[in-house]
Image: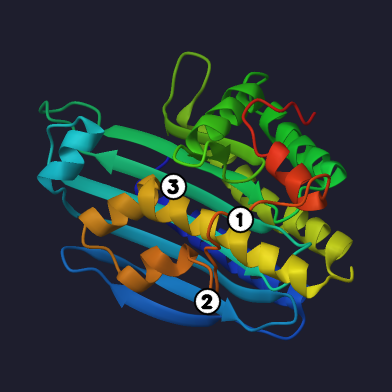
């Protein structure tokens, strides 16, 4: 059986690989690392890249934490036990170019000892990857979703459709009636079953993690040399505000980190360096901004 120590070690390796790929992609900026410990048990490695040629702000964080769950988290997870172990890699990248998309990825593992003496621990995997373009380019959206589908199909024919629908529902800003971006895949509490072993789920988790670097490198290089106007930059800041709203109001990882005494700088790493809230903004009829808003909907079939 895959152990939590093995999972944490492999996740650290994936963090290393992604950081190297992003430094190569930017060409100038490098990651700063901060190793931290959590009061109550465990810690992590926060890595941040800033003010690069294309990467304005980004984080690639690893954590492996353990201890006692607060009552609010136990209630949210619908569990009785107190002791827990959680490890994962979480990534958010904010580019400085409005034609280059924001991207987010997370892979994680959660474990609790059984409440029954001699019983198996309660454990599951979660994660996903999603894209938030400032401007939705349909060819890029099809490439992104096609790549994710190819990864999912290696493990289960139902994964892509199931997890794509889950992402559409999860990354939805209810108070705006729009999706955060063009979605991707999202899954949680994925456990072993008759046709799905723990080893297979772990391999899928790692494959999702390793899909990040090639897919984002391709999307950045497709768009990084495009010209843009000051008005398009202002639209980028407007779209970033929606990203911030989702992460502060709805994001489950943000809530879990805050409620388990996580490291604040690491938790809020996902927020953009600059965002704007323009009052009652209305895009120009027929413009690219209006087109993008019309594509921020659930249920669009990109592949």
In depth, the one of 239 and 299 nearer the eye is 239
Instruction: Tell me the quarter of the image containing the N terminus.
Output: top left
1 or 2: tag closer to the N-terminus? 2
Q: Is residue 213 left or right of residue 48?
A: right
Q: Which residue is mark 2?
A: 48
Residue 281: numbered disc: 1
Q: Nearer the viewer, mark 1 or mark 3?
A: 1
Residue 167: numbered disc: none
Q: In the current view of this chain or complex, which residue is farthest to the top?
A: 194
Is residue 1 visible in the rendered structure shown here?
no
Label 1: state its secondary structure.
loop
Label 3: state its secondary structure.
strand
Give the Cα distance between marks 3 and 2: 19 Å
Q: Position of residue 188 (x, y in %)?
A: 43, 34
Q: Residue at x 53, y 75 (%)?
A: 273
Q: Position of residue 301 (x, y in %)?
A: 74, 26
Q: Position of residue 292 (x, y in %)?
A: 74, 45
Q: Which residue is mark 3?
A: 108
Callout 3–callout 2 Cβ contact below 8 Å: no
Q: Residue at x 82, y 72 (%)?
A: 229
């Amino acid at each position: 059986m895959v152990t939590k120590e093995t999972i944490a070690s492999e996740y650290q390796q994936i963090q290393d690989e992604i950081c190297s790929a992003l430094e190569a992609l930017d060409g100038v900026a490098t990651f700063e690392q901060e190793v931290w410990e959590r009061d109550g048990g465990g810690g992590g490695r926060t890595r941040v890249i800033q003010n690069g040629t294309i990467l304005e702000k980004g984080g690639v964080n690893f954590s492996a934490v353990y201890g006692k769950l607060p009552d609010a988290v136990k209630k949210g997870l619908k569990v009785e036990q107190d002791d827990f172990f959680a490890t994962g890699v979480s990534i958010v990248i904010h580019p400085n170019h409005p034609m280059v998309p924001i991207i987010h990825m997370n892979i994680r593992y959660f474990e609790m000892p059984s409440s029954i003496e001699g019983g198996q621990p309660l454990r599951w995997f979660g994660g996903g990857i999603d894209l938030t373009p400032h401007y939705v380019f349909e060819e890029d959206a099809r490439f992104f979703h096609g790549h994710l589908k190819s990864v999912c199909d290696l493990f289960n024919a139902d994964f892509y459709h199931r997890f794509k629908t889950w992402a559409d529902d999860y990354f939805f800003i209810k108070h705006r009636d729009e999706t955060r971006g063009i979605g991707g895949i999202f899954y949680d509490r994925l456990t072993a079953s008759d046709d799905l072993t723990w080893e297979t789920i772990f391999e899928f988790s790692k494959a999702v993690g390793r899909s990040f670097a090639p897919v984002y490198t391709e999307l950045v290089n497709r768009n990084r040399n495009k010209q843009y106007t000051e008005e398009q930059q202002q639209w980028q800041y407007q779209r970033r505000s929606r990203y911030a709203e989702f992460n502060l109001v709805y994001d489950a990882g943000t809530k879990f980190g805050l409620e388990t005494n996580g490291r604040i700088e690491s938790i809020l790493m996902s927020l953009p360096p600059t965002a704007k809230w323009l009052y009652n903004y209305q895009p120009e009829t027929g413009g690219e901004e209006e087109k993008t808003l019309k594509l921020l909907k659930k249920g669009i079939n990109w592949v």
